[in-house]
Amino acid sequence: MQLLAAYSWRNVLARRLTSILTIIGVALVVFVFCAVFMLSNGLNQTLVDTGYDENAIVIRKASQTEIQSILMRDMANVVRADPAIVEAADGGPFATGELLVLINQPKRGSNDPSNVPIRGVGEHSMTIRPGIKLVEGRLWQPGTSEIIAGAKVSENFQGCGLGETVRFGSRDWTVVGIFEANGAGFESELWGDYDQLAQAFMRPIYSSITARVPGQADFEAMKSRLENDPRVTVDVMREKQYYAEQSNFTRTYISVLGGVISFIFGAGAIVGAMITMYASVAGRTTEIGTLRALGFSRLAILTTFLAEAVFIGVIGGTLGVIAATFLRRFEVSTTNWDTFAELAFSFETSWEIVIIAYVFAIAMGFLGGVLPAVRASRIKIIEALRAK
């Protein structure tokens, strides 16, 4: 078996051009496959990381997103009074009512308009999400037209950089600070004082209430109380679950489209591998006859050619995976079709994606080599030696 393995390896090296072309084809397919699922994984991680395990979020029943949700102030007071919410340092409930509105803003470079989320926040909005940190400038002054910008929206949109001015709500708003949120979706938002933004947009309501409810039993009790309270019509869920669901449509779209593209490209790579292996069998008929005459079985011949095809798939898969890892340096900005807001995120790999990519590469090699391998194993010794 070691002799046959060495024989297969030498034949791959001997037919460098056809082998290299097939390897490149497999590598390109694996690269596209990894890129698609890294994109989907990056979107999912960005939105999942936006939420915190110990936080609960309350929105109007059946609203799906904060953009659609309207909570009147009397409803917000009922939510804040729930006993499951922990006490803040100031003695009140550790909860924050927020307003979320979309504005249209041109992108840097292209000047193409896109939706940017504006979040009106309260005094606990940053402390209730410990991953958010101000990295440049300062916080807004209460009662003024000042805002802070997430790192990604600051980089991608005109007027959203530190010291720049953006106009919405019939006012000019000055960006006085830049914040980061460990890559979470909040980095694609502008934040400002709730009272000022509610006045500017003439929306004296809340889009959501976010509260600290660390215990699962307390959360379940709060959920049951509020969703059955006739004074309010709300849905209560964990913040992490809520933001994970915001990527469902976009993530599914990317995965399905990428799967179709990968299948089409994969079929092409399989055909290419099959042509390469058929050519290899045709050029090695005499060698196959000699091996059979030396006592090697049909199974050994079949296994040898299959191993050669799989080996080509593994090399191509390795190159494709390595090339795909460099995509982590790039950032993508697209519309999240669940919220219609612009969202920036990066390509993110995982061991699951790498393993599936290798399985995909091996499968391409196997499917491309199985018929030529069967053909090689069925060559008769006399006919093979006569071909010489």
Image (cartoon, grey):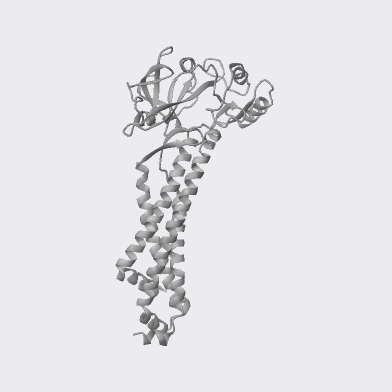
> Residue 159 location in percent, x, y?
34, 24
Left or right: residue 110 compared with residue 36: left
Q: Nearer the viewer, residue 252 or 362?
A: 252
Q: Nearer the viewer, residue 264 or 233?
A: 264
Name the residue at the top extreme. 143
Q: Which residue is rendered at x = 39% and y = 80% of the image?
A: 288
Left or right: residue 35 compared with residue 100: left
> Residue 34 location in percent, x, y?
42, 50
Point out the image quarter for the N terminus: bottom left
Left or right: residue 74 compared with residue 333: right
State the image quarter where residue 364 is shown: bottom left
Left or right: residue 211 compared with residue 318: right
Point out the image quarter for the C terminus: bottom left
State the image quarter where residue 380 is shown: bottom left
> Residue 101 location in percent, x, y?
48, 24
- Asked if residue 378 can be seen in this view, the reply is yes
State the image quarter where residue 16 is shown: bottom left
Q: Which residue is rendered at x = 50% and y = 16% of the image?
A: 202
> Residue 297 location in percent, x, y?
46, 80
